[in-house]
Image (tube, rainbow, N blue to C red):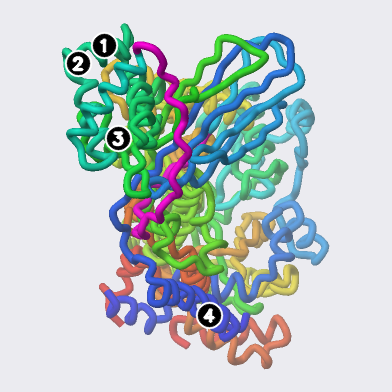
Amino acid sequence: MFRLARRLADLGIMGINRRNAEFTLAHNPRRYYPLVDDKLRTKELAVAAGIPVPELYGVVQSEYQVRYLPLWLKDREDFVIKPAHGSGGEGILVIAGRAHTNFRTVAGLLMTPEELNHHVFNILGGLYSLGGQTDAALMEYRVRFDPVFDHICYQGVPDVRIIVFLGVPVMAMLRLPTRASGGKANLHQGAIGVGIDLATGATLKGVSRQGIVSEHPDTGNSIRGLAIPHWETLLTIAARAYELTGLGYLGVDLVLDQDLGPLLLELNARPGLAIQIANAAGLIHRTNLVEQHRQELPTVPDRLAFARRHFGVNP
Amino acid sequence: MNKTHLYVLALILAAVGLGLFLYKVLVLNFPLAPGVESYTWNVEAKITFTAADEPVKLTLSIPRTTRRYAITNEAFVSRGYGLLTATEDANRQATWSIRRAQGLQTLYYRAEVVRVRRREVVSPTPAPKLEDPGFDGAELAAAQELVTRIQSRSADNETMAAELLKRLNQPHPGDNVALLLGKQTSVAAKMNLAVRVLALAGAPARVVHGIILKEQKEKLPLVHWLEIYNQKRWQAIDPATGAPGLPGHYLAWWRGAQSMARLTGGTDLRVALSSTRELETAISTAVVRGQIRKPLLLRFSLLSLPIHSQQVYRILLMVPLGGFLLVILRNIIGISTFGTFMPVLIALAFRETQLLWGIVFFSSLVALGLSIRFYLDRLKLLLVPRLAAVLIVVVILMALMSIITNRLGIERGLSVALFPMVILTMTIERMSIVWEERGPYEAIKQGLGSLLAAALAYLVMHNRAVQHLFFIFPELLLVLLAATLLLGRYSGYRLLELLRFKVFLKEGP
């Protein structure tokens, strides 16, 4: 058992305790958490900095506003409703279209307006928020993902998670929804995580709850060797998130829209650790390297160059 | 954050805790393991009477500390009454008084009684004044006849008293005794007569009234005993056989011919005695007995609290240990539970139900609650009303469970009521959400994790040796705090994480 721990440490695998003690606690000042925990503030912050985000249609702050929901959504064929303080992708409802008065979710289920309202009430009541405090519901643009992912995606929207340490992207993965994940791009819900070569933006192997995978379980297509478009832009947005929030250890979630290109979806101050499995690499060696050279990396281009030089598959 | 700071703090805490601990063990000789537990008795006298709307004065004889029993905590429960206690000869008395009272009055005297065995030699007491026996006429002649007989057959006061008692207790005691006793044949009457006859013979004697301590909630009978002044000491004699000594568990309440309670200003006076016992560690008894020196440390220890508060702290001190266990289970091993400290509270509830039944009750409550929660989900209720609804359902389920198990004759079912229902409600709610969001596998996994943590916490927290250790040496909490602080900076892998990351090793570098 100790040998196992020793070998994992040699590989630089980060454990939860280590992440909490030496990364989130040490590099993420608590006072900046609201910037990322509240998706509304993240959005405002990004817009102010000129970073593209999915357009916000409206915010439901309290119960009485729910009755205006049909009015607000009158002209919208498709949209996303998500809790402002949600975590782990919970409480996100993606409406892909309409059928008479009903809404059709991305999974093809029909929802009556009452059911939609109930979902919003649950969000407002704090069902999905951290600590159960009352929350707001955001309605926003539904991302139409880039067709490059068409053959390796089951419903939902694939997104790109980039871990940024002190402004330097250190690891990235592509998250592909599956039938098991119900169209959600979260690994613990059954989505597939695919490692990405930071230097080129090409996908590596994938990991699901079952283990390492090379094909998408629902479409059967290979997930390896796919070049992610706009890779430079994705990395740039991720690196800029550091200055945006002041958080030293950050998970940046991005999506690729077929029309709008890269969009910043949300930020996470406590990003998960499965990204290491998807990349078959540990985070610790990379973060150590960044820490050693942090003085030499003042600007975003510097940091991107550093990341591409050191954290690619064939450096 | 500087780690040295943490290490120094932990070191200081651990050093203080261990230092106190070692001082108590090595210098004060506190026992490390729980010794034989002894009992402390709670005795109670309940006095009821009807007041006649005039000044009331009630005098009650109360026990005093003797060589056999120490009276430790006394309480006089009497609303609006003035209270005065006084020691008079061999007796203590409490006098309640009030200017005006009407209707049924209830007063209580409560005391904690600890069995002691003082080794010191009994110091001689001065000879008491002999009271006039009050015989005259034919009675006097009969009594003198009796005295002559018993004196001729005895060597000292004690044997004389024994001889007298033997005669009094014969089925056909003879003419003299029959004359003196008249139609009264009760023990009390015989003993009063014995005291008078012995007084005539020049031997001081008195009746002792007391109770035999036993687990009895009400109507504890008074037991009368005889004491004779012999060789400058009072000597107890069994009134039935004349044998010396007192029965076991005998608590003397008062001495003399007067009645236990005397009342002016009321009628229908009744005194009911009861006694219950409470478990207590040998150590606090030892403190009371004076076998352990009483340093300042002890006067400010948990042992100085009343016994029922001690019982509370015995449990409370286990809660930090449960918390510590959860730190290990969650941060070192990596078990996930619903709610951080929920398992500790469940473990506390297991105390009453015992482990096996506790698990059965907990699982069935959660399972039933969960199924009802799934049904409520279809009604599309708002969050807080839904939580309240689940809470109500949980309480109803608990009540039903108690009733059904009671019907089935399973006594443990009654203690279901001690389950923390708010915690149960939150558990059910969170479990149902995890169930929906992450699937039944994850929900059941976390549920079993919580149950496992609760069971482990129960085993640790209800270990008698551990309880004793933390109760007698609460400074060990400082050591626990130090260990918790250190674990707070543990950044190594969790045990279950090793499984998760094992894929890295399969491929090999």
* Chain at tag 4: A
- Secondary element type, mark 3: helix
Front label number (3 vs 4):
3
* Chain at tag 1: B
Front label number (1 vs 3):
1
C-alpha gap between disc 4 and disc 1: 120 Å
Asked whether B188 or A204 is in front, the reply is B188
Rendered image quadrant of residue B401: top left
Q: Kindly indicate whether the residue at mark 1 contacts the one at mark 2 (C-beta within 8 angstroms).
A: yes
- Is residue A87 shown in magenta? no
C-alpha gap between disc 3 and disc 2: 62 Å
Q: Is residue B110 left or right of residue A38?
A: left
In the displayed structure, B227 sits above or below B339; it is: above
* Chain at tag 2: B
- Locate residue B506, reporting x and y percent: 26, 73
**On the same chain: label 4 and label 1?**
no
Residue A150 can be seen in this image:
no
Residue tagged 2: B173
Residue tagged 1: B178
- Locate residue B279, reporting x and y percent: 37, 44
**On the same chain: label 4 and label 2?**
no
Magenta residues, start to end: B110-138
* Mark nearer the N terminus (1 vs 3): 1
Asked whether B21 or B82 is in front, the reply is B82
Residue tagged 3: B357
Q: Kindly indicate whether the residue at mark 3 contacts the one at mark 1 (C-beta within 8 angstroms).
A: no
* Mark nearer the N terminus (3 vs 2): 2
